[in-house]
Amino acid sequence: MATLNQKWQPKTFEDKLIFQYSVKNPGNYYLEVPIGSSRGNGNWPKKSGIRRIDVINIKNSNSYNKIFGQKEFSYDDFQKTVSNKSVELIEAKQKLNRLVIGQVIAGHDMFEREYDVQDIEMVILCSKGDPALEWVCEKRNIKVEIINLTNPEKTI
């Protein structure tokens, strides 16, 4: 599967996890999607701060992927694009930990409210797992992808 990255190139460790995941999973990937602003559609209380979800993948059956950097899409265009779609809400961290589990859960609820999307699959990308926390994720229906960046062919 080819990935079309017109402007975006992976730079950080998390970017590299996202890129490797995108190679094997079809969709249109939107990076750093905003949630929580009182100026958005979520009807958040005043003084609510903007947070960003690492990636929203709008699943498709194409044989290629497209990755949109934060500056390559507008809030309004994204709002229209994501309407009535199945999405993966993705958080990427070097290690699976309680922080990233909390981020993906809070991100799910806030994204659902902000964009009125009902079919959201939570995904955590990491290079190092933890059996106890993987159990927590399984219990909460959070998909964990452990990606070996030193040898991507050996990804679990």
Image: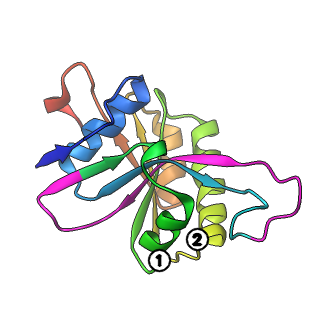
Q: Residue 87: image x %, image y %?
A: 41, 66
Q: Are marks 1 and 2 in contact (CB under 8 Å)?
A: yes
**Residue 60 is covered by the magenta coloring:** yes
First to last magenta residue range: 43-65
Residue drawn at the location 64% of the way across and 37% of the way down: 99
Q: Which residue is mark 1?
A: 83
Q: Position of residue 151 (x, y in %)?
A: 18, 22
Q: Secondary structure at mark 2?
A: helix
Q: Is residue 10 above or below residue 142?
A: above
Above or below residue 20? Residue 51 is below
Name the amino acid type tagged 2.
Tyr
Q: Is 88 placed left or right of 28 in the picture?
A: right
Tell me residue 36's x, y (percent).
72, 57
Find out whether residue 139 is within the magenta segment: no
Classify the position of the C terminus by image quarter: top left
Task: For label 2, count other residues whose C-alpha is less than 10 Å away and answer few (under 14), some (14-19) or many (20+).
Answer: some
Image coordinates for residue 32, horizontal then vertical, percent? 52, 45
Residue at x 22% of width, y 34% of height: 155
Q: Residue at x 37, y 23 (%)?
A: 11
Picture colour scheme: rainbow
Front one among 91 and 69 = 69
Q: Residue at x 24, y 18 (%)?
A: 150
Is tag 1's residue or tag 2's residue first in the polypeptide sequence? 1
Using the image as rendered, state which of residue 62 and residue 39 is in the foreground.
39
Q: Is residue 141 above or below residue 2?
A: below
Residue pointed to by mark 2: 115
